[in-house]
Amino acid sequence: MVDIKHNIDSILREIDGRNCTLIAVSKTKPNELIQEAYNSGQIHFGENKVQELAGKYEILPKDIKWHMIGHLQRNKVKYIAPFVHLIHSVDSERLLKAIDKEARKAGRVIDCLLQVHIAEESTKFGFDEEELLSLLHSDEFANLKNINIKGLMGMATFTEDQEQIRREFSGLKKLFDKIKNGVSVDNISMDELSMGMSGDYMIALECGSTMIRVGSSIFGERNYA
């Protein structure tokens, strides 16, 4: 039996004083377990599928802050635009424009993180540094009035090599600082750096993460059934 409250409290002790938000990754988890985590004081939850996220939003407490952390298709933005707290996985200019359009329809400004490809695996999504900086300096980007770029998100290579993970996270922090100090546009605030999951969040914290996305260390191993 997984003790969700104990697991959350343990992680909160580890990140205490580090100015970091714990996002409980609740993908594939039933509503009862999410409610249990919520009852323990957890209000930030991360999902990676739009249909699952929208369904849970309808049923679970309305003050939950829902984070979209998985790959997001443009044609599905409309289902989460009215309520999503933060989209972590913005990996293209076209997606950013789709979010801006749906946010405008919903009468909102949607907070987003730009996903940067920092891992060696080609399976992970995200911008590279050159195309990201080019986008942020463009007039087209400045005209997107219904999005606010809160920062960056990245996923390290799935490896046992902690030095490689540290290099990848440190590189993302360097890019984050470069944008924070060098790009001055109304729709960029740059105060969140989302990096670190169950297996590597302590390294991410050392490298300056302000958001960690933790699933199995809270809820137990993932259920793909």
Image (cartoon, rainbow, N blue to C red):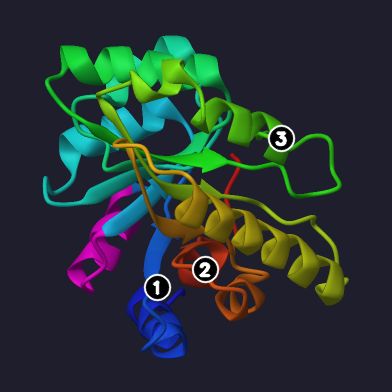
**Residue 29 falls left or right of residue 101:** right
Q: Residue at x 35, y 34 (%)?
A: 53
Residue at the image point whose x is 52% and y is 68% from the top: 209
156 relative position to 28: left or right: right
Circles 3 and 1 in contact, beta carbons < 8 Å = no
**Which residue occupies the foreground of this view, 22 or 100?**
100
The CA span between labels 1 and 2 is 7 Å
Seen from the viewer's position, the closer of residues 123 and 182 is 182
Assess whether residue 225 is covered by the magenta stretch.
no
Whether 40 is among the magenta residues is yes
For marks 1 and 2 on the same chain, the one whose residue lies earlier in the sequence = 1
Q: Are marks 2 and 3 in contact (CB under 8 Å)?
A: no
Q: Which residue is mark 1?
A: 20
Q: Is residue 188 visible?
A: yes
Residue 128 can be seen in this image = no
Question: Which residue is rendered at x = 47% and y = 14% of the image?
Answer: 74
Say what secondary structure mark 2 lies in: loop
Q: In this picture, is 155 found above or below 221?
A: above
Where residue 183 sits in the image (x, y, percent)? 47, 44
Q: Which mark is residue 130?
A: 3
- Residue at image x 38%, y 77%? 8
Mark 3 closeness class: few <14, some 14–19, many ≥20 residues within 10 Å = few
Horizontal side of 40 relative to 206 (left or right) equals: left
Classify residue 195 as left or right of residue 31.
right
Magenta-highlighted residues: 31-43
Up/down of 140 relative to 174, above or below: above
Percent x, y of residue 194:
50, 57
Residue 111 drawn at (x, y percent):
31, 39
Foreground: disc 2 or disc 3: 3
Mark 2 vs 3, N-terminal side = 3
Q: Which residue is mark 2?
A: 209
